[in-house]
Image: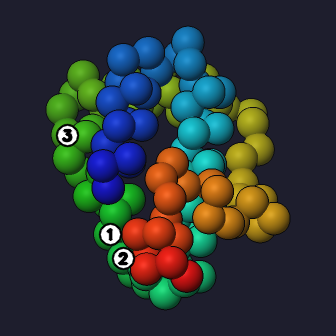
Amino acid sequence: MLIDAKIAQEILKNPIGNADEMQKKNNRHSHCLFYLKRKKVFSSSALRNTIAFTENNMYNTKTRASAYSDYNQALSGGVYGIDRSKIKADSCDYDVDTLLGGE
């Protein structure tokens, strides 16, 4: 959730100018989350709850919601999805396997 919040803060600082870079960070973070799901650290509902928590707490004012809308508009027309080949431990910004007990 901290990484979600960090990315959200970066989006709010410059929603249009760095939209592509932020989308790449979001995708990388998503690959990490799906890796953790694969390792049974997260369930599908936990992933949905993480997304909902971030949206409800980071985009909770008109100004922030407007910035997030600008970000989405800047990405308009793009296709962004999860690349299953990138769902692995090194998609995480930390040593996830060590945190999981050396798996």
Q: Nearer the viewer, residue 84 or 48?
A: 84
Q: Residue 25 carries which label?
A: none
Q: Please tell me whether mark 2 sits on a helix, a strand or a loop.
A: helix
Q: Position of residue 16 (x, y in %)?
A: 53, 16
Tag 1: Cα neighbours inside 10 Å, few (<14), some, or many (≥20)?
few
Q: Please tell me whether mark 3 sits on a helix, a strand or a loop.
A: loop
Q: How far apart are marks 2 and 3 (CA)?
A: 21 Å
Tag 3: Cα neighbours inside 10 Å, few (<14), some, or many (≥20)?
few
Tag 2: Cα neighbours inside 10 Å, few (<14), some, or many (≥20)?
few
Q: Where is residue 89 in the image (x, y as percent from the top left)?
A: 62, 64
Q: Quadrant of the C terminus?
A: bottom right
**What amino acid is at disc 1?**
Asn
Q: How far apart are marks 2 and 1 (CA)?
A: 5 Å
39 lies above or below 33: below
Residue at position x 81%, y 65% from top? 85
Disc number lying in front (2 or 3): 2
52 lies above or below 41: above
Q: Position of residue 25 (x, y in %)?
A: 57, 39
Q: Return the residue at label 3.
A: 60
Q: Are the residues tagged 2 and 3 within 8 Å (C-beta)? A: no
Residue at position x 43%, y 80% from top? 101
Q: In which quarter of the image is the N terminus?
A: bottom left
- Would residue 45 be found to the left or right of residue 26 on screen? left
Q: Are the residues tagged 2 and 1 within 8 Å (C-beta)? A: yes
Q: Which of 37 and 59 is in front in this view?
A: 37
**What amino acid is at disc 2?**
Ala
Q: Is residue 5 visible?
A: yes
Q: Position of residue 73 (x, y in %)?
A: 57, 27
Q: Which mark is residue 49?
A: 1
